[in-house]
Image (cartoon, helix red, strand yellow):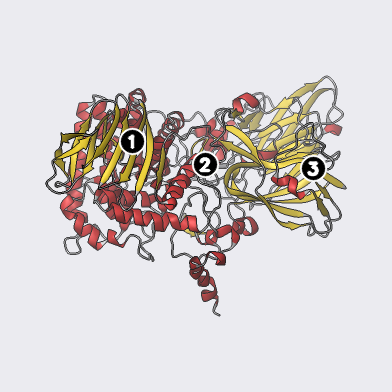
Amino acid sequence: MQPYLLRRLPVLCLLFAGCLPAQQRESTIPAGQLDPTRSVAQPQLFSALHTPLPEQYIWTREDSVVGKSAPIHYRSPGLYHKTAPHYFRVVFHLDQAPAQATLYLAGPCSVTLYVNGVLAEQISSDLLNPLDMHVFPVNVARLLRPGRNVLAMEVVRGRGVPGFVNSPLAMQQIFGEVLLAKLIPAPDGVDAPAILLSGPQWKGTLHAAAGWEQPSFDDAAWPAVTALSPIEGSIDLLQWNADAGLYDWPGYQGGSPFLARMYLPASKVEDVTPGRSSFANLPALTQPALTQTEQRSEKEFSVALKSTAPGEQYAPALTLDFGREVSGRIQLVSDTDSPATVSIKYGESQGELNHDPYLGENVLRLAAHQAGHGPKSAFRYVRIRFLSGGPELKFKAIRLEDIYYPVDYQGSFASSDPLLNRIWETAAYTVHLCMQDDIWDAPKRDRGRWMGDVDVSGRVSDSIFFDRFLLKDTLSRLIGPAPVQQHINGIPGYSAFWPTSLEAYIQHTGDLEYLRQVHPQLLQLLQFMDQEFDAQDEFLNRTGAWQFVDWAPDLYGDTAETRQATSLEYVRSYLAGADLLGQLGDTANAQHFQARAAQLKQSLQSSLWSASSGDFGPRWQTNAMAVLSGVADPGQFNSIWNNVLAQVGQPTFRPNLITPYYGAYVLDAMARMNHRQAALGWIRQYWGGMIAEGATSFWEAYDPSWPKDDPHADLQADGRTGYFASLAHGWSTAPAYWLMEQVLGIQPVAPGFSRTILRPDLLDLQWASGQEPTPHGLLKVDLRRQNGLHATIQLPAGVHATVLFPVSAGVTRILVNGAPRAGQPAEDGARLAIALDAPGIYDLRTR
């Protein structure tokens, strides 16, 4: 059989569940139990368990961007660029020299270290390793002395990681231009009070004269370093995987004080490879950790470690499967009398784990009877190799430290279709996984704030978790302080999504105080965006920004199609901005951007609408945004549907690829065009397709036509294909809010649900029920198919609702709590508008 056919054969296996590899079968986790943190009543917060470390990131003053007022432009230096050495010195005094002492260094990719003029270490990390930072432990006990001591070092910046954030501090860290140091009077792996920390007392320069490393060198002319921040002093330092390599820094937790943690054992142990060694009590790895009173010697997991030579080829290893996507890190608690060394690999899929783990394979050194953990990330599988120690290694626990944002599931959705229920729950869980140190795109990659992702996941958060703090903090840090001088995330289209996300947040929460707080940034952002057009309303990209609409051919980079779709996004943004400015009483600016939206709509109608083909081009993304922005007139909807969007759900080939991200806007456009049943079918096919392939969270990219033998390997994102793609991505979660908006029909249209549209629509379902949090309490909806639609609505005080109830042609009354009530015809007589202005429980039916 040809290799191509071998690769395509697994597509046919979708017809036979037994054909699929284990990791691709549908999850067997019971409904309502996908999120393991959902039942936690008393979260263990980091703020109650950990005091932030005092050591500070430092760097040479000449090469620091912190404190400079110029706009931040993300131009990451290449691996082999900007490699000039930086020199650091510090003088400190000891009453007596400690018997044991370990100096920990992190940040640079290479270090040449002198202690009291003696070369103590010369080390460099592998620049091909995906981690930005590496911790270099150096035994310096023999070189320390009572009295005056001098550390001097030459370093080269770290490799850096991709990222963009409105924080000079974070960009300094992301570029790898930081140094950390901590001297502890203890052997490697044992934490203790430090006797020296990196901080403002250090000196640094780019230019060092001969003899700079000697204790007698006069460094009076060297400037003090820039002390950037304590290592755990800012949430901006916990983004973009920039701190992933600090997993073995003594005492480092790297979690915001509002996050929580819980411990979970593995669901299964797989691929056990003892090599020359042997394992005992493997079942302990799938059970909760033993308590202090339980006998350990007979119940603990242990490794009888023998030779792993040659080259650790025969190191014993095993894989832990946690049964679902999780966010956190693996923790190992040693019960061994000697140090041990293990290596750790993570994988969101078995393919990633075994072939190309995103964070690579990382070594962890465990001191006797100490705990250690791997890097923070998202994964399902963990591969552990036991490299040295022993001869017997015993462990009190090897388990997941689940790191999560404690929040309640206040919103809900359930229906007669179990697949839709699982899709809703998976979308909700995916967003919760992304709620970490702010709302991220994903907990594996990029672990950062991206505005486009938040435009989708923020709506899910509003509808289900009703959490104000994390979404506000995310929006505030994305736009940064006034004045606004650059595009959000450096992308014009992402600037357009900031006002739309803010509008959705205000409609759900009624948080007008926050709206007033960000009034200056909102106006400045809209004005900054508007400079991209010329006098004829052609998008020119005057700022030279990188453009992005979706990971599909010609919809990223500076292309004609990207500019066209971005222009449509701007119209939608101007309308949202005008609405918000009007709520603020900023009438003049509200009218200006309302007029700009109308003017731009007219120009885009003229330039983008094709009368001959009856569409805004062939792309789903562009036509969907034309509908949502109002550029497409309702009279054009049928043509757009017949010529373009009716193809949604059909086999997709280049260039008609679409990610789940822009799938959100396609779903919204299908609802706007009154094709909700087709949208529901696509949800079942597209998001349900991920469920069928084993998803326990929704993926960054997907297409039902892609190969099924190893789905993760074929995911396409960032203009490339591979295991780097995220299997838990917030931008992929639109069905959660869509089902609540379009089936339950809950749609706030004024701040804090003060005015709400309720448009229930069972479509092909027999029943559906759920609730959505409002500032006034829960708004509950229960829908049943009983001689037409039977709806029960529980309305909290302060919510004024207009119910658009489905009726037959000519019907002007329905029964409300058993009494006839007249309404106003809507949607060409297909629905009746009924006002509900008082709190209470309402029973609505046609007869």
Q: Amino acid at mark 2?
A: Leu
For residue 61, side relative to residue 313 (left or right): left
| Side (left or right) of 26 relative to 201 | left
Residue under circle 1? Answer: 504
Name of the residue lying farthest toward the left: 810
Secondary structure under badge 2?
Answer: helix
Residue 34 lies, in percent from the top left, at 53, 44
| Residue at which label 3 appears | 300
Q: Which of the marked residues, 2 or 3, is nearer the chain's N terminus? A: 3
Q: Nearer the viewer, mark 2 or mark 3?
A: 3
Q: Residues within 10 Å of mark 3 (few under 14, many from 20)?
A: many
At x 50%, y 45%, the residue is 442
Disc sitting over residue 188 in the figure: none
- Is 834 positioned to the left or the right of 90 in the image? left
Whichever of callouts 1 and 2 sits on the residue coming sooner in the sequence is: 2
The numbered dot on residue 433 is: 2
- The residue lying at 17 percent from left, 34 percent from top is 821
Q: Mark 1 near mark 2, Cβ–Cβ under 8 Å?
A: no
Q: Residues within 10 Å of mark 2 (few under 14, many from 20)?
A: many
Q: Earlier in the sequence, mark 3 or mark 1?
A: 3
Q: Position of residue 783 (x, y in %)?
A: 32, 42
Between disc 3 and disc 1, the foreground one is 3
Kind of element beneath mark 1: helix
Alpha carbon separation for disc pair 1 and 2: 21 Å
Q: Is residue 506 above or below residue 287?
A: above
